[in-house]
Image (spheres, grey):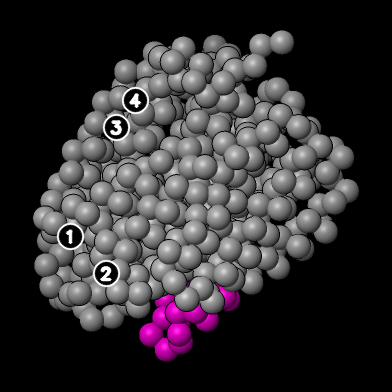
């Protein structure tokens, strides 16, 4: 029986290669901006609150828009959505050049908010498009590779963002990011395969209200899909730890390079996770136990970070936590792509991403509210404990679904 590998799907499928490269560019641009900005804002304002607000704006705006943007991904040409999102983000990055003092710090929120709007349109369209650029036997391998895009470019974007930001300043990073976003748009434009299945001739796209009702009805009728779209919330509820990454680096004397290294190690874990736990994808009976285990490991990892006395140990534990988080993301994505029909896929993925980003925003706002009044280890331990508790509750609530956790081709 033919079993696709990560290497074969990348080398043998031109359109997948272009889509994957475009995602690499987009994710890399995101972090190449964020790392120097998270260091710049405390320097300009003297407070850690602005960094937390930027992270919360990035995720919170995503969460609010995703119910609508998912319907857009199912109604309109996904290729045009992806290209337009890249170009809109390009314009938003240019606004960051005006952030030069404490008085102009609020403009960073405007710029990141506009980038978040663009990302809210990009993410569900890209996730929904993936099964259309590969053949069904290649979907598992394609998900493993695609799932590594975020982790790969968190490593590259975060580490290079820290290095370039320290050497040349944040504004050079903003300029590079603008160029990368234009490159992402160009790569997407060269994909030949259609990014969604065609409708029957004369059939108009569903109206937004009807499309939302249809997707919610589908979720109500499918308990396993409901379980899968709540998986990413576990790591999301623990994501407030990112608010204190720059502060942790400072406490250990690592500065901007240390902050970049923390984000890079986070990305390295997310990159490794899909490959380390990839066999779970091919063993249907392991899916739900594997998802619960990955959630729990994320929480345990950050409980360890809270008490780790040495920066190298902190890096190891962050890597382990996000190895679990990366595996969690890819496993749930693959299951959803195999279960959900193409006409609903954009909306279901938007719900999935909405819940995840809403959880992230809640966690980051909670951390931001207390970052100036409690020790960093309290935030780390609290976030880890929340994720671990969620994992246990989710596993108990879904234990009867585990035997039905199969992935059927759409």
Q: Which residues are magenta?
A: 364-383
Residue at screen point 33% across, 63% down = 259
- Depth check: 79 or 182 in front? 182
Contact? badges 4 and 3 (CB < 8 Å): yes
**How far across and down, in percent of the image, does residue 185 sit?**
28, 30
Q: Nearer the viewer, mark 4 or mark 2?
A: 2
Which quadrant would the C terminus be assigned to in this image? top right
The disc placed on residue 182 is none
Q: Which residue is mark 4?
A: 188
- Depth check: 92 or 301 in front? 301
| Distance CA(mark 3)–CA(mark 1) | 26 Å
| Distance CA(mark 4)–CA(mark 2) | 37 Å
Residue count near mark 3 (Cα–Cα under 10 Å), binned few <14, some 14–19, many ≥20: many
Contact? badges 2 and 1 (CB < 8 Å): yes
Residue count near mark 4 (Cα–Cα under 10 Å), binned few <14, some 14–19, many ≥20: many
- Depth check: 288 or 322 in front? 322
Q: Does dot 1 land on a helix, a strand or a loop?
A: helix
| Distance CA(mark 4)–CA(mark 3) | 6 Å
| Distance CA(mark 2)–CA(mark 1) | 9 Å
Q: Which residue is mark 3?
A: 184
| Looking at the image, residue 242 lies above or below residue 269 | below
Q: Earlier in the sequence, mark 2 or mark 3?
A: 3
Residue at screen point 46% across, 12% down = 12
The disc placed on residue 255 is 2
Q: Does dot 2 land on a helix, a strand or a loop?
A: helix
- Depth check: 221 or 242 in front? 242
| Distance CA(mark 2)–CA(mark 3) | 31 Å
Q: Nearer the viewer, mark 3 or mark 1?
A: 1
**How far across and down, in percent of the image, does residue 313 sit?**
48, 65
């Amino acid at each position: 029986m033919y079993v696709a590998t990560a290497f074969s799907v990348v080398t043998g499928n031109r359109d997948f290669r272009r889509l994957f490269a475009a995602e690499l560019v987009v994710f890399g641009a995101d972090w190449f901006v964020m790392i120097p900005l998270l260091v710049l804002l405390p320097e300009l304002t003297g407070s850690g609150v602005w960094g937390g607000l930027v992270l919360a704006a990035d995720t919170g705006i995503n969460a609010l828009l995703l119910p609508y943007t998912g319907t857009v991904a199912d109604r309109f040409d996904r290729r045009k959505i992806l290209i337009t999102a890249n170009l809109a983000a390009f314009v938003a990055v240019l606004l960051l050049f005006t952030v030069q003092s404490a008085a102009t710090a609020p403009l960073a929120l405007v710029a990141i908010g506009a980038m978040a709007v663009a990302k809210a349109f990009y993410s569900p369209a890209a996730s929904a498009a993936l099964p259309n650029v590969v053949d069904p036997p290649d979907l598992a391998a394609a998900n493993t590779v695609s799932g590594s895009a975020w982790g790969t470019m968190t490593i590259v974007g975060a580490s290079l963002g820290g290095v370039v930001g320290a050497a040349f300043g944040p504004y050079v990073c903003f300029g590079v990011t603008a160029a990368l976003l234009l490159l992402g748009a160009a790569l997407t434009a060269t994909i030949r395969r259609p990014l969604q299945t065609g409708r029957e001739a004369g059939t108009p796209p569903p109206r937004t209200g009807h499309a939302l009702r249809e997707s919610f009805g589908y979720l109500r009728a499918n308990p396993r899909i409901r379980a899968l779209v709540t998986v990413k919330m576990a790591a999301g509820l623990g994501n407030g730890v990112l608010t204190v990454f720059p502060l942790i680096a400072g406490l250990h004397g690592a500065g901007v390079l240390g902050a970049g290294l923390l984000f890079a190690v986070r990305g390295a874990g997310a990159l490794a996770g899909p490959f380390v736990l990839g066999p779970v994808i091919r063993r249907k009976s392991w899916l739900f136990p594997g998802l619960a285990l990955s959630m729990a490991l994320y929480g345990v990892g950050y409980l360890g970070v809270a008490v780790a006395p040495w920066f190298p140990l902190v890096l190891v534990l962050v890597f382990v936590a996000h190895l679990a988080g990366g595996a969690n993301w890819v496993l749930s994505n693959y299951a959803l792509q195999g279960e959900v029909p193409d006409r609903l896929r954009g909306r279901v993925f938007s719900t999935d991403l909405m819940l995840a980003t809403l959880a992230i925003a809640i966690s980051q706002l909670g951390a931001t509210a207390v970052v100036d009044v409690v020790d960093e280890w309290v935030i780390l331990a609290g976030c880890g404990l929340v994720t671990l508790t969620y994992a246990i509750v989710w596993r108990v609530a879904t234990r009867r679904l585990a035997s039905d956790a199969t992935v059927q081709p759409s």
